[in-house]
Image: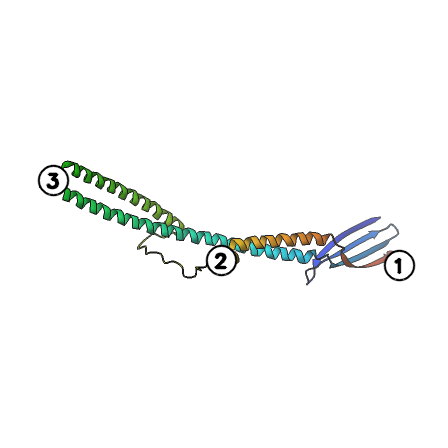
Amino acid sequence: NFESSGTLRSSTNSGTLKNAFFNQSRSHNHTVSSGLTLRQSLYSGGSTQSEVQSAEAAVLAQRAKLMVKEQEVIFNAVKAYIELWAQGTTVKVNEQNVVALTNTLKATQEKLAAGEENRTSVAQAEGKLAEGKSELELAKAEYERLAAVFTQITNVLPKDLQKPIPPQCVSNNIEEAVQNAMSFNPNFIYARFIHLSSVHDVEATEGRLRPQVSLDASVKRNIDFQRFRYP
């Protein structure tokens, strides 16, 4: 005797899985038996719909996660710009301070020459000037560091930085600002869709525990090859 069997799988237009089982057997009396069984799922306990909804929520969650990354890049660029602009202002203030201390030292030295000041006053003026120059060099070094960070983030060399303009779309009402953040912040959106995807996963698992309904159809045919033998 000889027997063979197999399974064919295909998808219908509605997305429901359809199975086809076939088997074939052959005996020593020259008789071949062939059969085909079709199985169409009609109801899967709602698990299929829940799985689709879970996948859709997961896709939306990943889109929100991408928005989070975009906001992080934009925030880092804005932060680098503001810090660099502020440090540039600090450098200008220190430069003006050095100019003022230099003028003070010159005036003190002139008074010393005229006998109106003593050497202690000159030494104090020199000390203040040295301290001012030291603060200026530190401010310039910090500016160069922040400029390197800004260039690393934006791939643009800082030039002619202007005073940042506060955004006009930010609400002055704290409650409204919190509500907008909860509605439009991508971190909240990501968390909501992750939660929704988990809920649908639970529903899909529960659906697989419910009764399943499917439609089966089968056909079988026996062929006796002795009928085709020549006399």
Question: Height in image: 135 above or below 46?
Answer: above
Q: Position of residue 161 (x, y in %)?
A: 32, 55
Task: State the residue position of label 1.
Answer: 227
Locate residue 168 relative to residue 18 in the image: left or right: left
- Report the front residue among 16 and 71: 71
Q: Circle 1 sits in a helix, a strand or a loop, which is it?
A: helix
Task: State the residue position of label 3.
Answer: 112
Corner quadrant of residue 125: top left
Q: Amino acid at mark 1?
A: Arg
| Res 8 visible | yes
Q: Position of residue 74 (x, y in %)?
A: 43, 54
**What residue lies at 69% left-to-right and 51% top-to-bottom?**
205
Q: Circle 3 sits in a helix, a strand or a loop, which is it?
A: helix
User: Which of the two discs, 1 and 2, labels the residue nearer the N terminus?
Assistant: 2
Spatial separation of the CA atoms under disc 3 and disc 1: 138 Å
Q: How is the image coloured?
A: rainbow
The residue at the far left in this view is 114
User: Which of the two discs, 3 and 1, labels the residue nearer the N terminus?
Assistant: 3
- Report the front residue among 79 and 159: 79
Of the two numbered discs 1 and 2 in the rendering, the one whose residue sits closer to the viewer: 2
**What residue lies at 60% left-to-right and 56% top-to-bottom?**
57
Spatial separation of the CA atoms under disc 2 and disc 3: 64 Å
